[in-house]
């Protein structure tokens, strides 16, 4: 039986978890969130966060499209985004790189520069790594972080009647991809969103103490809403017309023939945050000056996960990206 | 310029370190030891250890030689060995796997069983990971651990007149490789040493509080002695006839035409420990019933790193394995 016959990569992680010891008194949250949460660390009750990601040449990045600097920058940013999604602060970085014999030193130096720029931006310190030769290039990142108990946001913490909010317009990165696959040069801002995305560590410290569940949008809004519902045991109702969509998505949609909403629901790597929050706390967040967009509501489990179209039709909320689909 | 022109993988790690922020008050030791040491964690003054390794198909393992179970087992063991070399105890594991579309679920399950067996043996708990599709198979491991201050052994802690000791016979894993590359079936014990090596977490807790520097022997004795000397600012004198060599190495040497001592000096993946220790502490270790083998002495920096042959000749201590050499 091949991997795609069992449901792809997500099923595979579950399979490893079923085989291995996964319980420990200090492991507050293991597999299944943006980062693992390990207690018993910092004297001030903070927990240790650990997230890890593997980025593969021609899957997660294309060297004919992106510069090494952009690839390095994005590799760190997508992990910093996982720490942001837990309500935490990134700290120490470990970088393992498998590279081919023909990799140029100048390319590696450029990759490192992209990485170190993001490290400086977020106060991340390089603490270790590994380098090895391989037939194809891949980069494995492990990023540590710390989080205070009152800031910790798990995917399982959504409650019925919470609002569901996002921190910014969606679909921009996927729109960039459309331009590129169509052989067109993307508009500069979309190019930046695709190749040098930021993460929302600028607003996550303000959101975290007020939010319930939080997750970063790396596989499209639909998939992330479903992750929160699965772990919180809830339903969700998302209103299509409330989803903020990047202005350039319309142009990409015209090229690809997809709808703009499909970009927001299924387009990956926006690295905005999706979170649940009580209406009262959401108002408080606004008073702090943090602009976020209400896209729907958490509902009871029995109500399912639905997308309400601009015409008022209810359709199942599907989409997202599975590497083996 | 290509990677092998700048001195290979070790030079590459230095290059990343030069570009990036690497200093933090809590980072007691970053790049350059078996694991990073991060302070300010556990309430009882223990430090957090983090080690990471990337294993690549056809470089670090061969699927036509090793079963998935063996590959999984060894992947965890070599990281647990890094934690042992710091004087620590392994705790939480993160596994990222890049696999091909054709990878069989049964193969993955077998890999996971090998991993989880070692986890159970050493009390390691799986806490997260990532899975992605790629053109070739690779496995990236991050293993956390903890260490009490009095047990922490850095590579930089060797002092002139310390003894240099190893925990067991060397060259066995490389001997296994000789049999395999010659198309011969290795003797069972050598087969096990090559495919299912153990690590020395059984003796490291007894050695650590008495030792100075410690390192695991993954690239051959010569390379590891040089690592300790580089970081401690010392020389070393190793006596060839004192190096314990696995009994089967003689047979492999007869096949390959190399000398048995070359296996010990340059053969990788024995996962025994090399450590420096004062003569007084070494006697104390023996009284505890821990058998170790004195192979040489730490000397002043100016004396260089020398190998004393059975005939009394002094030759430079070279060898070891560089993935880009």
Image (cartoon, coloured by chain):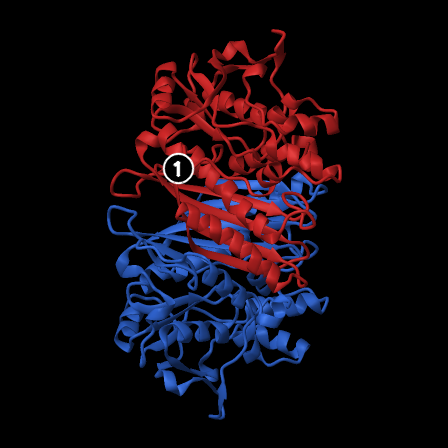
Chain colours: A red, B blue
Please say if B37 is above or below A12: below
What residue do we see at 38% from left, 68% from top?
B155
- Front one among B95 and A17: B95
- Front one among B284 and B149: B149
Chain hosting mark 1: A
User: Which image quarter: residue A250?
Assistant: top right
Asked whether residue A35 is in view, the answer is no
For mark 1, give the secondary structure.
Answer: strand
How would you rate the neighbour count of disc 1 (Cα within 10 Å): few for under 14, some for 14-19, many for 20 or more?
A: many
- Front one among A19 and B50: B50
Please say if B113 is above or below B6: above
Q: Position of residue B40 (x, y in %)?
A: 28, 49
Asked whether residue A169 is in view, the answer is yes
A111 left or right of B18 in image: right
Question: Mark 1 sits on what residue?
Answer: A37
B69 left or right of B157 in image: right
Q: Position of residue B310 (x, y in %)?
A: 49, 89
A197 left or right of B224 in image: right
What residue do we see at 68% from left, 57% from top?
A135
Q: Position of residue A11 (x, y in %)?
A: 60, 32
Assign the N terminus of chain B to one quadrant of the image. bottom right
- Front one among A99 and B86: A99
Residue that lies at the very extreme toward the front in this rendered image: A188
Q: Position of residue B207 (x, y in %)?
A: 33, 65
């Amino acid at each position: 039986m091949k991997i795609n016959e069992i449901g792809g990569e997500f099923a595979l992680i579950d399979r490893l978890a079923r085989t291995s010891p996964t319980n420990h008194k200090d492991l507050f949250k293991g597999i299944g969130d943006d980062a693992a949460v390990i207690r018993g660390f910092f004297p001030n009750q903070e927990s240790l966060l650990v997230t890890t990601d593997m980025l593969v040449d021609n899957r997660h990045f294309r060297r004919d499209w992106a510069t090494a600097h952009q690839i390095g920058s994005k590799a760190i940013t997508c992990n910093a985004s996982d720490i942001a999604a837990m309500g935490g602060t990134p700290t120490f970085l470990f970088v393992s790189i498998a590279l081919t014999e023909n990799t140029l030193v100048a390319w590696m130096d450029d990759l490192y520069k992209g990485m170190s720029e993001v490290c400086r931006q977020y106060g991340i310190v390089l603490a270790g790594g590994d380098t090895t030769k391989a037939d194809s290039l891949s980069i494995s990142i492990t990023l540590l972080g710390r989080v205070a108990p009152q800031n910790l946001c798990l995917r399982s913490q959504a409650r019925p009647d919470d609002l569901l909010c996002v921190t910014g317009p969606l679909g921009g990165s996927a729109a960039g991809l459309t331009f590129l696959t169509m052989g067109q040069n993307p508009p500069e801002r979309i190019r930046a969103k695709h190749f040098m995305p930021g993460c929302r560590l600028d607003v996550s410290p303000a959101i975290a103490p007020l939010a319930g569940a939080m997750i970063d949008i790396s596989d499209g809004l639909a998939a992330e809403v479903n992750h929160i519902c699965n772990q919180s045991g809830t339903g969700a109702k998302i209103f299509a017309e409330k989803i903020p969509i990047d202005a350039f998505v319309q142009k990409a949609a015209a090229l690809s023939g997809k709808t703009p909403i499909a970009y927001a629901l299924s387009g990956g790597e926006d690295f905005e945050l999706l979170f649940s929050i009580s209406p009262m706390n959401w108002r408080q967040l606004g008073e702090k000056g943090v602009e976020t967009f209400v896209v729907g509501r958490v509902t009871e489990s029995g109500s399912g996960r639905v997308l309400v179209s601009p015409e008022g039709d209810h359709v199942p909320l599907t989409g997202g990206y599975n590497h083996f689909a």
